Amino acid sequence: MLITKRKNYLTEFSLKQKLVPTILFVLLFLVGLVILLQYELLYIGAYLILWLVSYPVIYAGTCRYCANYGKPCPIILEGGMVHWVFDRVNKPYGMMQLIWASVAYLLRIVVPFIIIIQNQLWTWGILYGATFIGFWFSHLRITGCPNCVNYQCPLNPGTKY
Ligand code: SF4
């Protein structure tokens, strides 16, 4: 059900081609930050540190295995940045890489999520949740996966050359 239909074969993604998920990604970061601004500085510090830590996690666990390694990939600051930090790994890209990507995104959202639940910020929760879902929907169904040439990825559309 997660696997979408093939639209195109893009070896690089311009900012225009990934504009919607990029806006939603930035919005996700900002909404999380605004939620935490109402609380102690400690939460903001933890949020920023975990967001930073998520990059080595996703680079090491996911991006260095990907066909989009070192290229402007469907998500900003990931495939296009990994080669500055880690060498490429010539091993198959599989389920473990999706698990590491999930861990990285969990690190990015865990602090706002806890604050929303603890303080029952339901309106913020809906906004934050909608941004998160919108980001993943646009990436998985519209701009990223339907055009991706990382054929080994379990989420890649079946069509191969
Ligand atoms: S198929 Fe989708 S999830 Fe998999 S590497 Fe490509 S863009 Fe990322």
Image: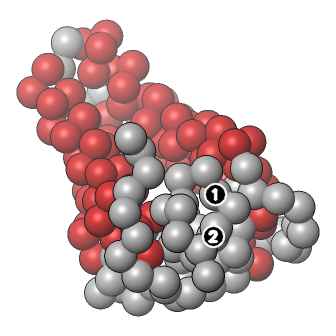
The answer to whether residue 159 is seen in the rendering is yes
**Which residue: 69% across, 43% down?**
95
Amino acid of disc 1: Cys
Amino acid of disc 2: Asn
The answer to whether residue 81 is seen in the rendering is no
Q: Secondary structure at mark 1?
A: loop
Q: Which mark is residue 150?
A: 2
Estimate how packed mark 1 is, as few (under 14), some (14 to 19) or many (20 or more) residues with alpha carbons within 10 Å.
Answer: many
- In the displayed structure, 63 sits above or below 96; it is below
Q: Secondary structure at mark 2?
A: loop
Assign the C terminus to one quadrant of the image. bottom right
Mark 1 near ligand 1 (CB under 8 Å)? yes
**Which residue: 40% across, 70% down?**
6
Relative placement, left or right, of 76 versus 50 is left
Residue placed under numbered mark 1 in the picture: 153
Q: Position of residue 36 (x, y in %)?
A: 31, 34
